[in-house]
């Protein structure tokens, strides 16, 4: 960002700017599969993760850890948590309702 240098995907992955490198062939299918995976995830958890990430931009580590612990305690009481555990024990895909 500081230099404006253009880097390729391999370099982006090497320096941690990207977390995976995909070939052009099959790229759209891989992106679609990833989006579907995210969409099937627990909405309450996704929301809490986004809040924690954004809040951590202006805070310190202790505050971030406190927010994470608070969030986990709140999510343990959700219907989605029960659904996730039930689905795991029953070896099936979970169906999250955002509650």
Image: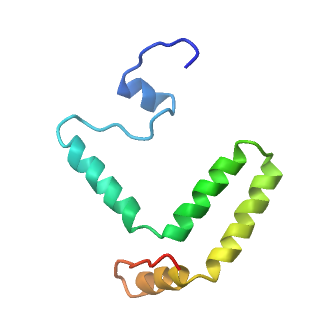
Q: Is residue 43 left or right of residue 51?
A: left
Where is 9 relative to 62, above or below?
A: above
Return the residue nearer the eye: 51 or 19: 51
Left or right, 39 with respect to 26, comes to right
| Residue 33, picture quadrant | bottom left
Colour treatment of the image: rainbow
Kindly indicate the quadrant of the structure image that contains residue 25: top left
Pick the residue in front: 67 or 98.
Answer: 98
Query: Where's residue 10, x and y in %?
Result: 37, 27
Compared across the picture, whether 46 is left or right of 74 comes to left
Q: Residue furthest left?
A: 25
Question: Residue 50: horizontal and vertical position, in percent?
Answer: 58, 55
| As drawn, 74 above or below 20 | below
Residue visible at 47% across and 79% down in the picture: 84
The total of numbered circles placed on residues is: 0
**Identity of the residue drawn at 68% across and 76% down:** 74
Q: Residue at x 75, y 54 (%)?
A: 64
Whether residue 82 sits left or right of residue 53 in the image: it is left
């Amino acid at each position: 960002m500081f230099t404006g240098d253009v880097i390729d995907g391999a370099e982006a992955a090497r320096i941690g700017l990207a977390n995976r490198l995909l070939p052009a062939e099959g790229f759209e299918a891989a992106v679609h599969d990833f989006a579907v995976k995210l969409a099937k995830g627990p909405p309450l958890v996704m929301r809490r993760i986004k809040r924690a990430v954004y809040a951590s931009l202006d805070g310190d580590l202790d505050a971030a850890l406190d927010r994470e612990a608070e969030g986990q305690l709140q999510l343990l009481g959700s219907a989605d948590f029960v659904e996730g555990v039930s689905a795991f024990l029953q070896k099936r895909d979970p169906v999250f309702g955002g509650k």
